[in-house]
Amino acid sequence: MQPRKLHLRFFLPACIIASLFAMPSCQDRSRGASTKDPADDGTAATNLTRLQSQNASVRKQAADKLGELKAPAAVDSLIKALADRDKIVRYSAAEALGNIADSRAIEPLGKALYDNESLVRLEATKALAKFKDKKTLDFLIYATKGYDYQVKYAAAKGLFDIPDPKSVGPLIALLGDDIDADVIVASAEALGEIGSAQAVEPLRKLVENKNGSVRQAAGKAIAKIEKSSSR
């Protein structure tokens, strides 16, 4: 009987196996795991520093974290980041400013509606909507007039929260949007919230729309307007 062959690979220490495959040693991994990266401490002060990094991904992460922290001390730096050379940083800066909702950011976010990147324009619109402040009215009305349906949808949702007769005309114009039903629904809801009789006839045209959500939104908006006008 031949002696059994030992499969020595099962008895080799893991670090030796790792070295055979040019993998990091156990010692290296252990040392790396025990060293905490100071950039990950999660404080506003640290992330304000990271916002100045040469690495766009680091700047984006910093803006995201500052938005999570809702740090008022970060507003000025995030406003500057709206002009960052990288679109992902501008996007995150807009989102962060919306989360913080400091009135200093309203004007800069309004300017971001002219950004070359649609995602930045969208996030700026969503950020302005979060303020629920009449100071954002003109900017949100402007956002209804673009060609990007997501921006128009976000603008209509924002106008719902700050009902004002000034937005009736632009919202009625959105009822004729033939690209996305969500835009029409959001506009109808906003018009119902404003309660202007001027919107009734345009809304009536949607009661027979082929889209069920549009029909429902139009019907509810008409009922809401008629109820408010009968008081």
Image (spheres, rainbow, N blue to C red):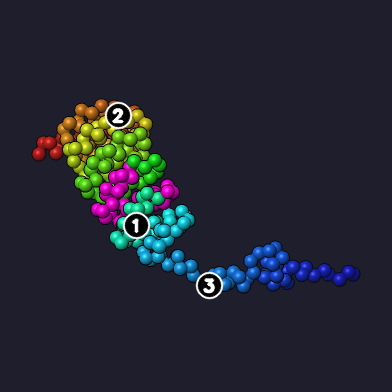
The residue wearing badge 3 is 34
Whole-angstrom CA distance, mark 3 to mark 1, is 32 Å
Which residues are the magenta region? 85-113
Q: Confirm whether residue 71 shows in the render.
A: yes
Say which residue label 2 marks.
176
Badge nearest the viewer, 2 or 3:
3
Residue 29 x/y as whole percent: 59, 69
Helix, strand or loop for disc 2:
loop
Q: Amino acid at mark 2?
A: Gly
* SS category of the residue bearing label 1: helix
Label 2 crowd (10 A; few <14 / some 14-19 / many >=20): some
Residue highlighted by disc 1? 77
Q: Are marks 3 and 1 in contact (CB under 8 Å)?
A: no
Provide residue 83's location: percent of width, then percent of height: 37, 49
Kindly identify the residue that appears in the image at 21 percent across and 35 percent down.
168
Q: Amino acid at mark 1?
A: Ser
Image depth: mark 3 or mark 1 in front: 1
